[in-house]
Image (cartoon, rainbow, N blue to C red):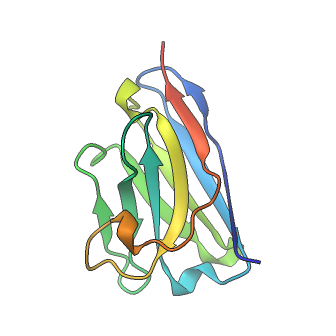
């Protein structure tokens, strides 16, 4: 059974940090492009950061460049999103997933399966 389990979300003050984790099961993560997406209330789901499985090139949303870093641990079949200098506008549900192509960048239309997500709230 293909499954993503996100964890590490929570409430953090502006300027703080969080590290999201995503454990994949039912398939081998290192054969896929991977990415993190988010959806804020009333907004469309958007790509945050994606990384290629071939050359490790990354695609980051302009709003998170220099603050968020995507990574993977193939031995543990797990991916991560390190989030620093968090802002209230980063508040959203965050999802990890795989992409069948990165030709469109970090785009939700290249995603076939979504996990339940983890809530991140940035507030004082």
Along the viewing direction, whichever of 44 and 86 lies nearer the viewer: 44
Q: Quadrant of residue 85?
A: top left
Residue furthest toward the left?
A: 62
Q: Which percent across, then down, holds residue 76?
A: 70, 72
Q: Quadrant of residue 52?
A: bottom left
Disc count in the image? Answer: 0
| Residue ID at (47%, 27%) | 16
Q: Quadrant of residue 119?
A: top right
Would you say 120 lies left or right of 4 here?
left
> Looking at the rendering, in which quadrant would you find the N terminus?
bottom right
Along the viewing direction, whichever of 98 and 83 lies nearer the viewer: 98
Residue furthest toward the right?
A: 1
Residue furthest toward the top?
A: 124
Q: Which percent across, then down, holds residue 13?
A: 49, 20
| Residue ID at (50%, 53%) | 81
Whether 24 is drawn above or below 32: the answer is above
Would you say 124 lies left or right of 64 here?
right
């Amino acid at each position: 059974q293909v499954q993503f389990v996100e964890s590490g979300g929570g409430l953090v003050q502006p300027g703080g940090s969080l590290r999201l984790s995503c454990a994949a099961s039912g398939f081998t993560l290192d054969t896929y492009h991977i990415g993190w997406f988010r959806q804020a209330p009333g907004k469309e789901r958007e790509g945050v950061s994606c990384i290629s499985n071939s050359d490790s090139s990354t695609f980051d949303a302009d709003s998170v460049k220099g603050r968020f870093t995507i990574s993977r641990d193939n031995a543990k079949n797990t991916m991560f999103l390190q989030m620093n200098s968090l802002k209230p506008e980063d508040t959203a549900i965050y999802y990890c997933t795989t992409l069948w192509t990165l030709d469109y960048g970090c785009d939700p239309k290249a995603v076939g399966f979504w996990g339940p997500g983890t809530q991140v709230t940035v507030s004082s």
